[in-house]
Amino acid sequence: MTTTARMRDKFTVVTGASTGIGAAIAERLAASGAHLVLVARSADKLDESAALLSRRHGVTVRTVPLDLAAADAPTRLAKTLADEGIEVEVLINNAGVSARGPVLDGDPARFRSLIDVNVSALTELTTLLVPAMVARGHGAVVNIASTGGYIPAPYLAVYAATKAYVISFTQALWAETRGTGVRVVTVSPGPTKTPMNARGTRSAEAVATTVLRALSGNGPAFIDGRTNALTALLFGRLLPTRLTLSVARRVMARSDV
Ligand SMILES: NC(=O)c1ccc[n+]([C@@H]2O[C@H](COP(=O)([O-])OP(=O)(O)OC[C@H]3O[C@@H](n4cnc5c(N)ncnc54)[C@H](OP(=O)(O)O)[C@@H]3O)[C@@H](O)[C@H]2O)c1
C-alpha cells in the first residue's frame, strides 16, 4: 500500500505530464505534498506546470524534457535522476500515443514509434527503477493502460495491443514483487476528455482520483469508472471473441477516437 502520506516529501516521476491525464495526476500528487519529476517532450509546458505546481503547493518540481520514443531515453532519464541524487518513491508511466485507422493503411514507422513509447519506454523505466525500490523495501509503479487493453480494437489495433501488453506485464510484475513492500499496479482509463480524445466522457481529474485509489489499494489492476469496468468485463472476458470483435468493429468504424 502506498498512501499519499508515504509519498509526501518524496519524488514521484510522472511521464506524459505536459497535458491530459498526466497533468491531472501531477496536480493531485503535488496537492498531497509529493515532489515531482515531470517528463514529456514539450519543455515549455513542463516548465509552466512546474512553476505553477511549486508555487501553488510548495513542492519541488523538476522537469526533464525527453522524447520517450528515443531508444536511449529511459537510460538517460535514470542517469539524470541518479546524477541529481533523486530517489524515486513512485513511478507513473503515463506517456502514451495513439494511432487510429486500418492497419492496412498504417505507417510502420509510426507504429514502431507508438510501441517505443507505450511499451518499450514503460518497460525499461520500470526495469531500471524498481530494483532500488525493492532494495529499500518501499515504492510504487503505476502503469497507465486502457480499457482498449482488455478488448481488441479494430482501427485502433496497435494502440490497443500495446495496452494489452501493459496490463499483462504489470500484472505479472505485481506477482513478482509480492512481499517486497513495492506496489505495482496498472490503471485503465476508458474514453477520457484530453488532447488525445476530444470526445472522452470521463475527466482527467477522475482518472487521477482512480490512480490514487489504485496506489493505496492491493490488487494488480484498476479500471477508471464503473461503466468502463463493466464494458471491459463484458466484452473482454464474458462474451465470445467473435461477437466482441463484430461489435467492436462497428463501434470503432463510427468512432473518431
Ligand atoms: N484519453 C483517453 O481517452 C485515454 C483512454 C485510455 C487510456 N489513455 C492513456 O492515458 C495516458 C495519457 O493520455 P492522455 O489522454 O492524457 O493523452 P495526451 O493528453 O495526449 O497526453 C499524452 C502525454 O504523453 C506525452 N508524450 C507523447 N509522446 C511522447 C514521447 N514520444 N515522449 C515523451 N512524452 C510523450 C505527451 O507530451 P508531449 O507531447 O509534450 O511529449 C503528453 O504529456 C496514455 O497512456 C493514454 O494511452 C487515454
Image (tube, rainbow, N blue to C red):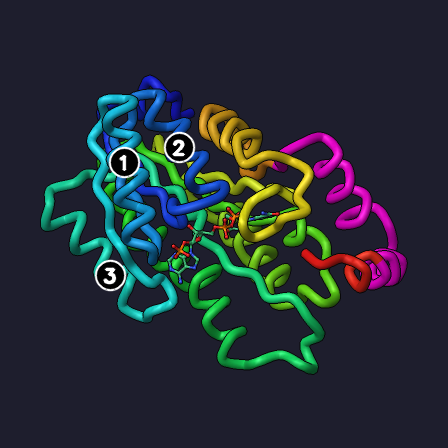
Asked whether residue 89 appears in the rendered view, the answer is yes
**Badge 1 or badge 3: first in the primary sequence:** 1
- Give SS at disc 2: loop
Asked which quadrant contains residue 24, the reply is top left
Residue linked to disc 1 = 36
- Which x, y percent locates residue 52? 29, 32
Q: Amino acid at mark 1?
A: Leu
The single residue placed furthest to the top in the displayed view is: 5
Residue linked to disc 3 = 75
Write the start and end of the magenta stretch as one range. Answer: 223-250
Mark 1, mark 2: which one is toward the viewer?
A: 1
Q: Amino acid at mark 3?
A: Thr
Tell me: residue 63, above or below residue 229. below
Q: Are dots 3 and 2 in contact, CB under 8 Å?
A: no
Q: Main secondary structure of the magenta part?
A: helix
Mark 3, mark 2: which one is toward the viewer?
A: 3
Residue linked to disc 2 = 179
Numbered label attached to residue 73: none
Bin the neighbour count of mark 2 within 10 Å (Cα to Cα): few under 14, some 14-19, many 20 and up. Answer: few
Tell me: residue 16, above or below residue 135. below
- Give SS at disc 3: helix
